[in-house]
Image (tube, helix red, strand yellow):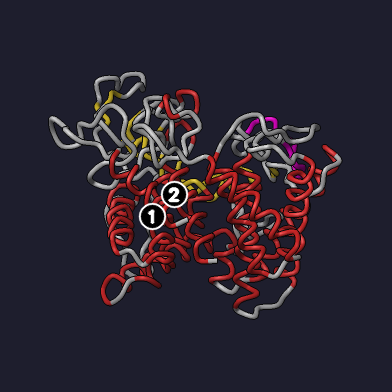
Amino acid sequence: MTTAIASLDAFIHRWTARSAKSPGDYSGDYIITPEGLVRNNMDEESGRGGYYHFRASTSESQVMMVRGYLKAYQATKITQYLIMARTIADALIKYFFFGVIPSANAKWHSHWIVNGGAGFNSKETGHESELIAYSEAYECWPTWRKLRPNEFATAGDSLHWFMETFDLLSLLETAELKTKWLTAKNSMFREFQMITAPQKKIVYKGAIPFEFSNKGANLSVQPTATFRGPYYSGYQNPVPWHFMKDYTAAANMLQLLIDAQAAYRTSTTIMGPFAPVYHYDTSMLSGATINKFSWKGPDPNTFWGGFQYRAFTAVADFWQQCITSKTSNPAVTSAATVSTAFLTWLDTWLTTHPTETQIPVTFNEGVAPIADYKEPHIIALALKGSLYCKKAGVNPQIVTRVIGRLYKMLISCQVTTGDMAGSFASDPNSHSFNGFWAGEIMDALALYAIG
């Protein structure tokens, strides 16, 4: 498995952007820039059907690549992996967090997307001549445009990725670098705790809403940022509440996921996966049905399997961390319930599909999930969740069977020849491979190696 990590690392270095005519003037196919910006997709396919520019770098890909390299370092003790993680982490702060880690008690915000290549023009009416430069944060709603002064929007799920990654950096670094990342983690704690602010009267208080932003109506910028939008099951991760010892908030989040599993069973008769969206208001989807699970949300890809396996993996991680730290409370019991139900469903599906080389990736309303295309990073997510379940002490016969099957599936996806060798591209000839895929897969391989 460490050979697979080394091959993936070699691929990433081989596909680093080069030969810019001027700083940041990168074009063509590459997955990372020399400055450490990770592209969402290394080829020139526009993201989300053209919603964002094809040279976009997202906070999702950036932080997952940091985490992947940190886990690779933990598994192998190869210093170059830690050095690579530092480079990408520094780029995360410089470009997504607008350049600084604040001192204690100062506000600290991030933005979800920056330009990861050559500049391109705004599409905003009346501003078409404005250039969105390399490494500049920009916005995609209602079209590609420059940010207003002080504007930012943070994807809700990136908050827990940031905290986990900053925690891992603080554990692996020493001296001043350790202090730097502890400060970063504590700054994120302050932001995350706004979810449970006393003035917020909201169901499942402790669950992560869709977005944290200061956007206002008509592209205005509000003086105070707020959490808004529905709960996506795939955005939930109780690990930050474990860091902060707020097990009431964790229990509320996990109750959302228990109820999401029940809603999925009502829709499909299958127990384990999650109904994807819960609207507690209509703030980001006009006409949404309130206080009910749905397959409709501001991100229309609610059927995407990544949202299923991210929730499973996050809850299983929380469960095993609580078991390891000898923490016992109702939230831990709920995590065991959620994780075991999902793992049992996955084991049943794998058993009834003995020759399948992919797991379900499409989870539509009212029908059984299907494995209609190959996405190796989803296999990696399922493997991670299963490895965490093993650490938590789940039924060893089931989890050993699942881990063995998933690892074999994942390794079979690694490209061994050609210019995409080392990657896990489903179609190597297309050069389509996501930055967040690379980070998630490296993370899974490292966890498997650690055992």
Numbered badge on residue 66:
1
Residue 75 percent location from the top left of the image: 43, 65
Location of residue 294 (image quadrant): top right
Quadrant assignment for the C terminus:
bottom right
Disc 2 and disc 1: Cα gap in Å? 7 Å
Q: Describe residue 53's horizontal placement relative to residue 424 as left or right.
A: left
Query: Which residue is tagged 2?
Result: 439
In depth, the one of 226 and 6 nearer the eye is: 6
Crowding at dot 2, Cα within 10 Å, few <14 / some 14-19 / many 20+, comes out as many
Residue ID at (60%, 79%): 325
Residue 17 percent location from the top left of the image: 25, 37
Asked whether residue 1 is in view, the answer is: yes
Location of residue 25 (image quadrant): top left
* Residue type at the position of mark 1: Val
Extreme residue in the left direction: 21
In depth, the one of 145 and 411 nearer the eye is: 411
- Secondary structure of the magenta portion, mostly? loop
Q: Are marks 2 and 1 in contact (CB under 8 Å)?
A: yes
Asked whether residue 231 is in view, the answer is: no
The range drawn in magenta is 285-294
Residue ID at (73%, 65%): 396
